[in-house]
Amino acid sequence: MKHFGTISRGIRTPIITAGDNLPQIVCDSLVAAVNEGNITINDHDVVCITEAVVGISQRNFATADQIAKDVQNHFGKDATIGLVFPILSRNRFSMLLRGISRGVKKIYIQLSYPGDEKGNKLVDEETFFDSNVNPYTDVFTEAEFKKIFPNTVHEFTGVDYIQYYKEICECECEIILANDPRAILKFADNVVVASIHTRHQNKKVLERSGAKKVIGLDEILTHSVDGSGYNEQFGLLGSNLLNDNGVKLFPRNCQELVDEVQKRLFDIFHKNVEVMVYGDGAFKDPQGGIWELADPVVSPAYTQGLVGTPNELKLKYLTTNDLTDLQGEELEAEVARRIKTKDKNLKGQMATQGTTPRQLTDLLGSLADLTSGSGDKGTPVILIQNYFQNWADR
C-alpha cells in the first residue's frame, strides 16, 4: 500500500461493562475487524484503548460518600476548606464538588477568571478587556464580580457555573474570584487544589505562603475507601461523572493491560504491535478556545516502542532550500536518501523546523481521541497503521 500514509481506524467492540475481560474483548474485536476488512497487521502498528472502558472494566468507581469520607480523613470533621481553581465542567467536576462539600462544614470556592485553565470562559474576552479589571491583582466576591460581569453563562453549555457550583454544594459555600492562589488564604488555611496541569505549582505557592494543609485532587482516593475504586497516582484527577451519585476514576494498572494485550496480539498475528491507553487528546478547539486535555496525562501507559518524540525531516524545507536544483526522479531519489541516512537525533537542525516536537503518545493519543470521538460511535479501540513509516518507505 505504497500510496497510503497514516491510517486510523475505529474498531467497534461489544458494550463493555464492569468486570469484563478487556484484553480478550480488545483482541477478539481487532481480529474480527481485520478479517472483515482484509487488513494486514504489521510490526509497529498501534492499538489504542480508551481509558473509559479500562476504568469501567476495572470497576474503578467511587460514590460521593466515599469521596466525602476521604476528604474527612485529610482534614477531619467539621472543617472549613478552600477549593482552588476547579475547572468549569459538569461531567468532570460536579460530582467531585458534591462529594468534597459533603465531607466539610464550609467551603470557599476560588474560581479563576475570565475562565479556567482549560479555556472555559465565565466572561468573553472582549467584555473582559473592556472592563479594566486587573487579572493579576483583583479579587472579587461573587456579588462584586456579577456587578461588573452580569452574564457569566458558558457560551456552549448554557450553564452559569458560579450559580451551578453553589447549588451543588451540600455545605455552606461562598465563591470568590481571583487568579492568585494565595487569595484563598484570607478565608481558609486548609486547601484543596483542584487544578489539573498547574496543580504542583499552585500547591507549592500555597505551602510557601503559610497554608496549614494543602492537598490536590490527586491526593484524594489514592487508596480504596469503604470499597471504592482508587488511583494511586492521580486520585480523583481524570474522573468522569458515572451516575447521580458517583464517578468513574482514571484507570489504574494500565501498564499490565497494555503489556498483556501486546503479548496476546503477538501470539495471534506474530507481529510486534504497540499498545497504549489514551484519554483526552492534547489539542485546543479553535472556536471555543477550550483545551481538551482534562485528564492528567494523554496516556497513562504504553508499550516500550512508543517512548520518545518524532525524529523527522521537513520535506518542504529540503525541497525549497537544499534541493532546488533537482527535479523528478533525481529529486525523489535524493529525498529518499536523506531520510534514510538522517541523524538519529535531529534536534536543533534546521531541516526539522516545522515538525512537531511532542511525545509520540500525545500525538497518537490525540489522533485516537479524534477518531473515537466522545459520543455514540462505539469504537473504544483504535488501530493506527503506517504511523512510523515515511516517504522513503514506499
Image: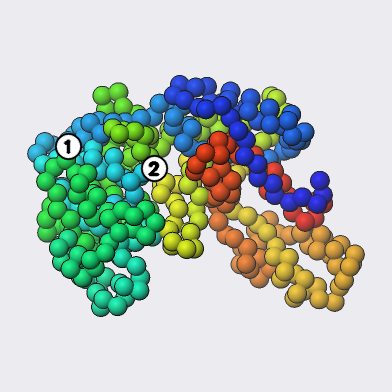
Q: Nearer the viewer, residue 122 or 230?
A: 122
- 295 sits to left or right of 134: right
Q: Nearer the viewer, residue 37 or 71?
A: 37
Q: Nearer the viewer, residue 97 or 365?
A: 97
- 129 sits to left or right of 349: left
Query: How far is mark 1 from mark 2, CA to CA?
Result: 21 Å
Q: Is residue 210 visible?
A: no
Q: Residue at x 85, y 77 (%)?
A: 325
Q: Residue at x 33, y 58 (%)?
A: 154
- 342 sits to left or right of 68: right
Q: Badge 2, how many Cα within 10 Å: few under 14, some, many 20+?
A: many
Q: Position of residue 310 (x, y in %)?
A: 63, 55
If you read the primary sequence from the N terminus, does the residue marked by circle 1 or circle 2 appear first? 1
Q: Residue at x 86, y 73 (%)?
A: 326
Q: Residue furthest right?
A: 329
Q: Which image quadrant is residue 44 in?
A: top right
Amino acid at the residue labelled 2: Gly
Q: Position of residue 206 (x, y in %)?
A: 22, 56
Q: Position of residue 80 (x, y in %)?
A: 11, 46
Residue 260 vertical placement versus 122 (above, below): above
Q: Which residue is mark 1?
A: 103
Q: Residue at x 18, y 55 (%)?
A: 175
* Mark 2 element type: loop
Residue 74: numbered disc: none
Q: Is residue 326 visible?
A: yes
Total number of numbered discs in the rendering: 2
Q: Which residue is mark 2?
A: 238
